[in-house]
Amino acid sequence: MVAVAILAAGRGTRMKSELPKVLHSLGGRSLVERVLNSCLDLDPSRRLIIVGYQGEQVKGALGSFERVEFVEQNQQLGTGHAIQQLIPHLEGFTGDLLVLNGDVPLLRPQTLKHLLQTHKQHGNAATLLTAQMPNPKGYGRVFCNGENMVKQIVEDRDCSAAQKQNRRINAGVYCFSWPELATVLPQLRPNNDQQEYYLTDTVNYLNPVMAVDVEDYQEILGINDRKQLAAAYEILQTRVKDGWMAAGVTLINPETLTIDDTVQLEADVVIEPQTHLRGNTAIASGCRIGPGSLIENSKIGANVTVLYSVVTDSVVQNNSRIGPYAHLRGHVEVGESCRIGNFVELKNSKLGDRTNVAHLSYLGDTTTGNKVNIGAGTITANYDGVNKHPTKIGDRSKTGSNSVLVAPVTLGEDVTVAAGSVITEDVPDDSLAIARAHQVVKPGWRLKSKSDKAQ
Ligand code: UD1
Ligand code: CA
């Protein structure tokens, strides 16, 4: 039986932020969310999150996770002090405790599985993840004998010059036999440079303690400042992009793209440079997205092109063409084989199949049928300054250039709106609506010049 504890009470002073460190976002998810996700595969019997600095905010951010228990650490007196807070919560618990730092977000689930297996296999009192770090600055150094048995862990700031030469670092990921840890926790003393209770000091009292090296040190990078946050993002992006390329997605100039690890792509999608795919986005086969596009929380059907455009919270069906320079936002649904063109904004609107909004338009709160043609510069006036109102346009209707549809208004099927019209009343099926001043032509009329006036 294994319980998991995540250390998430610290402020993270080196981030220089009002936001608690573990809530900083890495590719669309907070650090602590990522840490929690990395251990859910183990199906832990308890999930304990130790919170302190802005604890309410941390609790709120993890609200969607099931069976999570929060343990308060009111004063942040160190990682050992944080784990001491678990003692009353784990009374009678006889299994293992997996401890994860809330600021180590790139761990792979299989690494944690391997750690637990090793721990069990050897019957250790504690087993901890270590790595040979090219630049070990800032990390605790782990000193072992030849058999990977841990003698001591010394924090970077407490290391002598000679100890600093050791590149084997503590990842902040541990598996403890809880009954053994619980008996030694009260023995911790804050006799170090930071005057904190260090969890790492428990290895001085436990036996046997074993270190297990991770294969890839990048997995255990800790986030203490913004530079490390950016470096972790790079690593995550490389993982995500390598994964999609292996799955048959073409990425052109991959270093100019960002793809959240929540995004789903099908084989034979092409992502062009300077494109960003975020959140709960899914893109079907044959799409060409970009260059220069942002797609967030949207579902894109097969064979769609999106060129220099922004699509958020929307759905686009198969074979439609979006852009250049279109903005779809606030729950837009575009049907099949539509063309949403140059400088067009769509908001909270549903367009039928084969409908075109090709140039310079704004449609808000609008529903159209199929085969509708929205002329260049057509605008729905959907907002009266207080409320938003709907516009409905039936199948095969056409609006002339520069028409304004003042909502609420309904155009029937096969309606034609003359160019430059301001439509304020409903138009029935099969009708032409013209709502503009008649053109007046005055033959022989000419502007009088100054010399004409003088005469
Ligand atoms: C810690 C380890 C170090 C290791 C490194 C790996 C200790 C003493 N040191 O150092 O050996 O190499 O992680 O990344 O454990 N926290 C609390 N309550 C506290 C203090 C911290 O919950 O009172 C939480 C923080 O929110 C953070 C985690 O514990 O998520 C680690 O704390 P941090 O101060 O970043 O430790 P490091 O100095 O990085
Ligand atoms: Ca840290």
Image: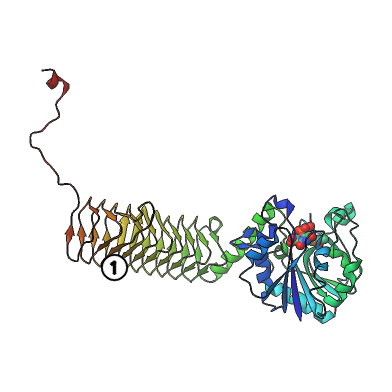
Residue 103 lies, in percent from the top left, at: 71, 61
Residue 433 lies, in percent from the top left, at: 18, 57
Q: In which quarter of the view is residue 375 placed?
A: bottom left
Residue type, mark 1 in image: Gly
* Above or below, comparing residue 284 to residue 348 in the picture: below
187 on left or right of 102: right
Please count the marks in the image: 1
Snapshot colouring: rainbow
Which residue is the extreme one toward the left?
444
- Tell which of 222 and 167 is nearer to you: 222
Q: Does residue 150 appear in the picture of this structure? A: no
Q: Residue at x 25, y 55 (%)?
A: 424
Q: Quadrant of the C terminus?
A: top left
- Tell which of 95 and 142 is nearer to you: 95
Q: Residue at x 58, y 69 (%)?
A: 243
* Above or below, comparing residue 377 to residue 262 in the picture: above
For label 1, the residue is: 369
